[in-house]
Image (spheres, rainbow, N blue to C red):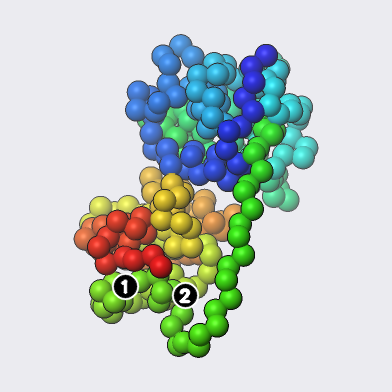
Amino acid sequence: MVNVAPTRTLEETIAWEVAHLGQHRPEGEWSAGANVNDCALFQSDALGHRLAIWNVDGFKTATGGTYHRGKAGLRRGDVVLFDWNGDGGGNHTEMATTAPDAAGNFQTIGANSSARADHGVAYNIRNGYVLGYFRPAYKTPAATAAKPTKTATSNRTDDDEMLSAEAQSWLKTEVVNKIADDVRRDSRYRLYYNTETKKYFAINHNLPSLDPAKIAYFVDETQAQHWFSPYEFLGDSPAQAQQVTSAQQATLEGMARGTDSAYTKK
């Protein structure tokens, strides 16, 4: 038996996987050769144990969590085992990022995915062929200190305090002014469409700048739509995506990651 007790919290683990979207062997550091289950290595690496589980069925007997047969009770953060041919052996594994909906559909993320032509890390919408799932004993998130109460009166908003004067001036352009309004809308990801590269990307402006899940990149419109519906991680559908140029995307990314000179986090 292999111990894969997570070294991360549930959300940190999923954020680690999201940060590897699009990567594939030999780029992914979880790879160990062409004759091993790349998908299983990816999941054990996400839990903080590199090269710990070399085949899908290894999760059936792993410690540091519990294995459950079937699909009942499946929830976000579970490592799902799939049996494509019904022989009781695991053929593939991905991590559930949502619980099943009323129709039994749930979203996953994993490596060696059929959702990409190069079998890189990608999101998927699954339903059947579930052999069982491994539920890791995730670390408990650290307690968050209470935010001090403001005593001074001011017309400035929290959003304004996140931006320097230079950044606020930049936000006065026609296109980016609309983006500034989107930042304030809600806690979901805002979706953007680069009219030059023809690619979608999303930013969660409420996550910390160093969070690897702050920016998500999509292979195509279909993947972006999966994020929007039925799970609504996105605050916009692809048709509602804000159109930007490559230069505007670079500035947005820099501000989101806290590396742009016009961005100051108070």
* Marks 2 and 1, how far apart at CA: 12 Å
- Image quadrant occupied by the N terminus: top right
Going by the numbered disc 1, the residue's amino acid type is Ser
**Point 60% across, 41% down: residue:** 9
On screen, residue 166 above or below 84: below
Percent of width and height locating residue 54: 54, 16
In the displayed structure image, the side of residue 249 where residue 9 appears, left or right: right
Q: Which image quadrant is residue 48 in? A: top right
Going by the numbered disc 2, the residue's amino acid type is Asp
Kindly tell me whether residue 108 is visible in this rendering: no
Q: Earlier in the sequence, mark 2 or mark 1?
A: 2
- Image quadrant occupied by the C terminus: bottom left
The residue carrying mark 1 is: 164
In the displayed structure image, the side of residue 60 where residue 247 appears, left or right: left
**Point 70% across, 18% down: residue:** 61
Residue contact at pointers 2 and 1, CB within 8 angstroms: no
On screen, residue 239 above or below 121: below
Q: Between residues 141 and 53, which one lies in front from this camera angle? A: 141
Q: Between residues 71 and 10, which one lies in front from this camera angle? A: 10
Q: SS for tag 1?
A: loop
Q: SS for tag 2?
A: helix
Percent of width and height locating residue 110: 51, 34
Q: Which image quadrant is residue 104 in? A: top right
The residue carrying mark 2 is: 158
Q: Residues within 10 Å of mark 1 (few under 14, many from 20)?
A: some
Percent of width and height locating residue 237: 47, 62
Percent of width and height locating residue 106: 63, 44
On screen, residue 191 above or below 53: below
Q: Residues within 10 Å of mark 2 (few under 14, many from 20)?
A: few
**Point 42% across, 21% down: residue:** 31
Q: Which mark is residue 203?
A: none
**Point 41% across, 74% down: residue:** 161
